Amino acid sequence: LPDNKDELAGLEVGDVDDLDESDEEAAEDERQMREAIRKRMVNVSKIEKVVEKGPFERRPDEIEAVRKEVAKMEVFRKIQVSPAAERDICKFARLRKYKQGEHVFRQGEIGDAFYIILEGICNVEHP
């Protein structure tokens, strides 16, 4: 130690073999958790790229790519929809963008759509 120091703090890097099993298990648990999160993350840009096209301009592989992304959403994991219905939803979905403060719909209007929020947040107000 230098003369003017009473103590020294440092890290010792030992041999990798010194890791105990709990460290290895914790590292594996973290890898699995990150993979599970990655699998659930929705690729919004992939969806937008496809649904910006008209329904009959979308190729089957594009519709399937959107279906796979939408299937990651909790609402679609909870409801049971046939594969054909999932494909139709992804084929006919339209991209709509709203400005801050803009109303999506108002109470009393006829409901003719199912909305999926891809980005941002909204408020639901009931008078």
Image (cartoon, grey):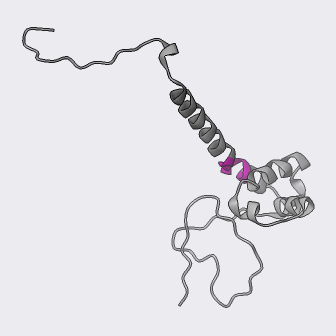
**Residue 103 left/right relative to 81:** left
Determine the residue positioned at 74% across, 72% down. 114
Task: Pinpoint residue 43: horizontal percent, then vertical percent.
Answer: 68, 47
- State whether residue 21 is above or below residue 85: above
As drawn, the residue found furthest toward the front would be 21
Q: From the viewer's side, name the closer residue of 5 and 80.
A: 5
* Residue 12 appears left or right of 86: left
Occupied quadrant, residue 70: bottom right
Say how many tags the image has.
0
Q: Which residues are magenta?
A: 40-48
Q: Residue at x 56, y 36 (%)?
A: 30
- In the rendered image, residue 38, in percent from the top left (x then y), is placed at 64, 42
* Residue visible at 79% across and 50% down in the picture: 68
Examine the residues drawn in magenta and state their main secondary structure: helix
Q: Position of residue 3 (x, y in %)?
A: 8, 8
Residue 4 falls inside the magenta stretch: no
Q: On the picture, is 49 further left or further right than 118? A: right
- In this view, the residue farthest toward the top is 2
Q: Is residue 63 above or below residue 113?
A: above
Q: Position of residue 40 (x, y in %)?
A: 67, 49
Q: Quadrant of the N terminus?
A: top left
Q: Quadrant of residue 113?
A: bottom right
Residue reaching furthest left?
A: 4
Between 91 and 34, the one nearer to me in the picture: 34
